[in-house]
Amino acid sequence: MKKSIVILISLIMALSMFLAVSAQRTDLNVITQVSPNSLDPQKTSMLYALQVAYNIYDGLMARDTSDQVVPGLAESYTISEDGLVYDFVLRQGVKFHDGTDFTAEDVVFTINRAIELAITNSGNIESAEAVNDYEVKITLKKPNSVFLSILSSYGFFMLPKEAVEAAGEEFGRNPVGTGAYKFVEWVEGEYVKLEAFEDYYLGAPEIKEVTFKFIGDSNTALIAMESGDADYSYVFPASASEDIEFNEDLKLFPFNSMSLQIFTMNVQNQYLSNKLVRQAINYAVNRDDMVIVAVEGEGRPTSQFCNVGTFGYVEGFEGYTYDLEKAKALMAEAGYADGFTVKLIAQDEMTSKMCQVLADNLRDININVEIEMQESNTAIANYQAGNFEMGVFGIGNSTMDYDSMGRLFTPGNSLMFSQATAEDEQAVKIGELFAEASQLSDPDARLEVYKAATEEIWDAAYYVPCFFPLRSHLLASDLDIECVRGLGVALVKEMHWN
Amino acid sequence: MIYWDPAVLYACRVLKFFLKKEGPVAKYILRRLLLMIPIMIGVSFLVYFIMSLTPGFDNPARIVLGIEATDEAVAQLNAQLGADKPFFPRYLSYMWNVLHGDFGISYRNRLNVSQEILRRFPVTMILTTFSVLFSLLVGVPIGIYSAIKQYKPSDYIIRVISMLMTAIPSFCMGLGLLLIFALKLRILPANGIKTWKGFILPSLSLALVSVAGMIRMTRSTMLEVIRQDYVRTARAKGQTEQKIIMRHELRNALIPIVTVAGITFGRELGGAAIIENVFAVPGLGTYILSGVNNRDLPCVLGAVILLSLSFSLINLLVDIIYTFVDPRIKSQIK
């Protein structure tokens, strides 16, 4: 009798152990590089803050797994004839993490706060008013065909009026949203913990607990992934991709990043003010080589400012080819066949490799390039102040639409690094073309305008666009994800364990 | 203000005690403590000046809000942070607040600077203190042994190993230890300080690099002392070898050793930043680094003031230890 009980008990224990082992994991550990400065989406634009925040909030519009704009918290919408008034019908029954209902009042509050804080893309919004509890009317100053895409971006994530007003400045440390995950805990400098929001309007997510750990050193992040301390990492050393291939427990998930790597030329400089010189530089650069050297072949060389898949991409546009003869001819025409010296600012390892390829290429047309390393905040400050000759930087596209690039070409805009002023007719013309395109609603008409803009930009040659790097994130092998948004953010609600 | 006033009251009491005691050492300590105030002011001004030379110093809002934020939002935030004030008013208003116990809020994440610093300070102190203690408790005996056994094989082995260890940068040491103990053997955590085990690898990385220096310093000082006449006299008197080492040789060698320990402490308060980064430990070093990167003035100045205060106190401690080690120094204080 005793013996059979013992056998029975051991069988039960063995069985439960087996069950425990084969039970699905419900937690996830993610590595981001730095602690967010705030989790208030209207007070930050840092990628590592968004990597957490995108899980906490939703917007009126959302992006699906192919990065297309689809209705989110708004069930449906209508746009007025003149393109100025957007009427949104909101989903009912959506709750915030603190249990309060999501209503039109929260939408109006969020939009007004965005205007008050003067966040990016809020300048064109005239007003927002609630028609009833679940309907909102948003009026624009000028028609803008990318407005729906703007509403899907982080600056317009829906915030709860009561909670934000009650928390004041502290809201950024205790975020409340409608997203799949609700905020649990934030230990500054160490981690942020989120847990699944069971009342999420699209259904409770599979993974129940997420911890975002902040690990700055890419090697340490790799070791943490290898030891099982973490399951998803935004950070890892580029040189380790081969090691990762051999490691069965890890895999890389590549995605098309929207971040364009590009050189800027200061048109106030005596040599670079000559358009022919700038064009010559563009024809002298071997973009294929640059991709090989800077990102080990993982990238798409380009002479356009948007990637395939972004609206505004012109199919079959030749742009700048690698043509040394043409470059020399242009330099001779400009009167600089003997070349000159120019200083180039590089920021980090990858950009300095880009700069070295550029320097090597430009030597062929007698331009002597002196490379100077600067820390990235310093470099950007110098570009904005016009305190440079040539520089390198990366620029993202948050709306997946060519419209976002317009700021690079608009005189007076803080992103017009190349310092073209309102006196430069071509720059003004390009700025006007972008403004025109943003007000049209017919996609074909917009594409025509963008084609014209692309031609002008190619001719004016204010920048040297180089390539779109193919980025990857590091995952544990048994973790699956459908897609990573072009912005570089992965949504935990779309991840599941195998 | 609230926690400052009791501190001032207590300081007054301590002051009265010292003045009553009239002992020369007490007066010396008091003088040194008072001297720390101009030192801290000087250090903070120097750091402020250096930061003012960096581009983006008067535009921290641009860094906080990002490259794509509107100029309007940036101007708004800059005004809020007081970053648009000219050079001297900005410094003076900061120091005025500091005198009232208010170290301001971080530009980057609006957290109270004094709270953050007091939270991170113990972490860095643990790493640095462990490292210095390790150097003293492990490095000194090994150095003594190496000096006694000069020219014997054990001396050579110790010298070669310590030279190798001095050559290895601390982050290399850190990564190596991580690979062995966290990845291969899995007995220690790879990052963070959730449990006390998390402190072992970072402290060890710091310690192993500085212990090598201490070994060589101890060895060379001991070698000098061994050749002195008073050691020969003691041996002639028939003193046991053990007592000779302890009472005569070591005690005289202690002054340079203690000096090096003090300098090591100061150096590592800064050098811990690299180790903190590698092991993802939230200490003061990474706080300053990210503060400098983000032109976050309150963070950098607050942390620098605290660090200069701790370094001054350690130096004072070292000087007091001198008076116990060497009576000749004590008599000089009068």
Image: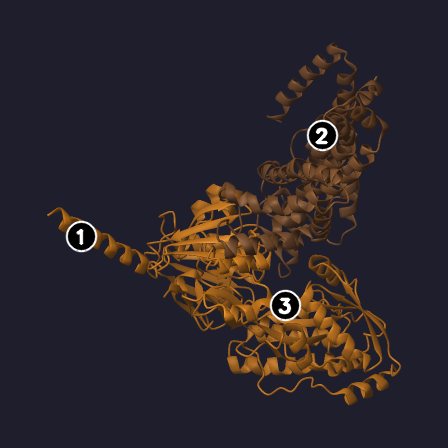
Kindly state the secondary structure of the residue where label 1 is placed. helix
- Between residues A335 and B264, which one lies in front from this camera angle? B264
Q: Is residue B159 left or right of residue B69?
A: right
State the scheme by which the image is colored. by chain
For mark 2, what is the residue? B313
**Residues behind callouts 3 and 1 on a single chain:** yes
Chain for numbered disc 3: A
Q: Amino acid at mark 3?
A: Ile
Residue B302 visible, this orientation: no
Note whether A405 is above or below A162 in the view shown.
below
Kindly state the secondary structure of the residue where label 2 is placed. helix
Q: CA distance from mark 3 to mark 1?
A: 66 Å
The colour with which the image depicts chain B is brown
Instruction: Identify which residue is drawn at 65% across, 87% down.
Output: A318
Q: Residues within 10 Å of mark 1 (few under 14, many from 20)?
A: few
The image quarter containing residue A196 is bottom left
Q: Residues within 10 Å of mark 3 (few under 14, many from 20)?
A: some
For mark 3, what is the residue? A395
Note whether B140 is above or below A340 in the view shown.
above
**Which chain is rendered orange in the image?**
A
Chain for numbered disc 1: A
Q: Is residue B155 left or right of residue A446?
A: right
Q: CA distance from mark 2 to mark 3?
A: 48 Å
Front: mark 1 or 2: 1
**Residues behind callouts 2 and 3 on a single chain:** no
The image quarter containing residue A121 is bottom right
Residue A7 got which mark?
1
Label 3 or label 1, whichever comes before in sequence order: 1
Chain for numbered disc 2: B
Residue B31 percent location from the top left of the image: 79, 22
Instruction: Identify which residue is drawn at 68% across, 20% down.
Output: B11
**Residues behind callouts 1 and 2 on a single chain:** no
